[in-house]
Image (spheres, rainbow, N blue to C red):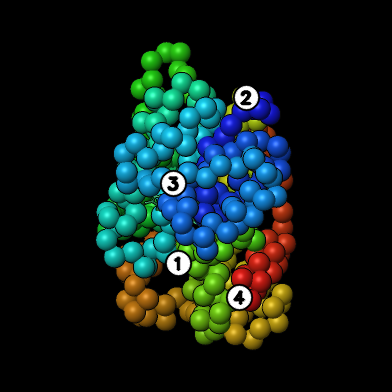
Amino acid sequence: MADNEISLVTGASGFIASHVVQQLLEKGNDVHATVRSTKNQKKIKHLLDMQNRWPGKLTLFEADLLVAGSFEASMKGCSVVYHIASPFPIETRIRDGQKEVVEPALKGTQHVLDAVQKCETVKLVVLTSSVVAIFGDNADVLEMKNKTLSTEYFNTTSSVTHNAYSYSKVVAEKEAWKLHDAQPSPKRWKLVTINPGLVLGPSLSPTSESGSLSLLDQLLRGQLFLGVPDMWFSIVDVREVATAHLRAAENPDSHGRFILADNTTHGFVEFARILRSITQSSRIPRNKIPNSVVRMSGPLLGLSQKWLKLNLGIPFDIDNRPSLDQLSIVYRPLEETLADHYSSWKKAQG
Ligand SMILES: NC(=O)c1ccc[n+]([C@@H]2O[C@H](COP(=O)([O-])OP(=O)(O)OC[C@H]3O[C@@H](n4cnc5c(N)ncnc54)[C@H](OP(=O)(O)O)[C@@H]3O)[C@@H](O)[C@H]2O)c1
């Protein structure tokens, strides 16, 4: 991407998008960024600070995923669109999957790409998808080649009532590919998807309620002091995720889908132990809760027996090679990610 081109970032109040905006500004790019409301000064404080640090380089626009035409003004003159906005609540807190996650994810993608179709300057869309657009439950990965997660697959097991957030990500990503493929030849705009695992690391965003931040918040507040379930996550640092977005635009040969995650899953208990040693807090557990106990208490935690059977105690491997080969991502150690995550969390507590 040439230095004088303008990039649009959607959902700039969020955890991942804030880092994308910051990295673009650090590289000297001009950035248009959308937020739901520019009046919510608390939510956008980090963006106002960036405007002071890089005068004239960052312009804020209001846009809502649910409102048709909302993204057109902000896209004017842009060559790259980073579509990152989409709700990411913790799955157990979702009451109405269709309304809370599927509709905003799908309609938002349609509205952003409708604007792209009308905006002749756009050459590339980088969509923030997720590993959960590839698999729904951990057990799904055991059916994949070499029991390894790879971009050859799409999640076929999630629905509005089972892993609704994962379902929102698969329908949004599929819609994006459908609209991309439907362009007449030669296609004007290219599509790249970034499919991160659970994203951790320092937050620039003062109010993000991202599911990954909420999960660690529970651990750091000592709410899980009795122990953690035998759950396994693919993990990545937010700074690597942001860099991958930028590299996808910088490398003219990058195409398709990129998993952003370490090459194997990490146990919840592993990051509890690392955080316990960093924080020296005895309220962070170092033990797993036995699966039989988790199964008994599942309903109280909002976890179905089906979900527990398909997810508890199932680690897997991940093929992250395209992110290494095409985007030159260097994954930092989990210990560094968690130490920086904790420092930023502690600072936010005041
Ligand atoms: N964090 C992870 O572990 C992870 C992993 C894989 C993929 N992702 C994806 O990464 C993206 C960003 O997630 P995040 O972790 O950065 O979460 P986040 O901090 O909660 O960011 C979500 C963003 O979406 C915006 N948004 C939600 N509903 C909207 C609406 N109706 N109209 C306009 N904007 C709306 C939010 O705006 P408000 O601030 O106004 O609510 C916020 O800026 C999402 O697409 C998510 O699916 C996240």
Q: What residue does disc 4 label?
A: 349
Label 1 Cα crowd, 10 Å radius (few <14 / some 14-19 / many 20+)? some
Query: Visible in this render: residue 84?
Result: no
Which circle's residue, 4 or 3, is located before the other in the chain?
Answer: 3
Which circle's residue, 3 or 1, is located before the other in the chain?
Answer: 3
Q: The C terminus is located in which quarter?
A: bottom right
> Would you say 6 lies left or right of 193 here?
right
Q: Is mark 3 on a helix, strand or loop?
A: strand
Q: Are marks 3 and 1 in contact (CB under 8 Å)?
A: no
> Would you say 332 lies left or right of 225 here?
right
Which mark is drawn over residue 252? Answer: 2
> Would you say 72 lies left or right of 194 here?
left
Q: What residue does disc 1 label?
A: 312
The x, y position of residue 167, in whole percent, is: 35, 50
Q: Do the residues labelled 2 and 3 touch (CB within 8 Å)?
A: no
Relative height, residue 199 to residue 279 (above, below): above
- Cβ of mark 4 under 8 Å from ligand 1: the answer is no
Q: Are marks 4 and 2 in contact (CB under 8 Å)?
A: no
**Picture quadrant of residue 205:** bottom right
Is 20 in front, or is 285?
20
Q: Is mark 4 on a helix, strand or loop?
A: loop
Which mark is drawn over residue 239? Answer: none
Give the amino acid at mark 1: Leu
Which circle's residue, 2 or 1, is located before the other in the chain?
Answer: 2
Spatial distance from mark 3 to mark 1, Cα to Cα?
A: 41 Å
Spatial distance from mark 2 to mark 1, Cα to Cα?
A: 40 Å
Spatial distance from mark 4 to mark 2, Cα to Cα?
A: 42 Å
Q: The N terminus is located in which quarter?
A: top right
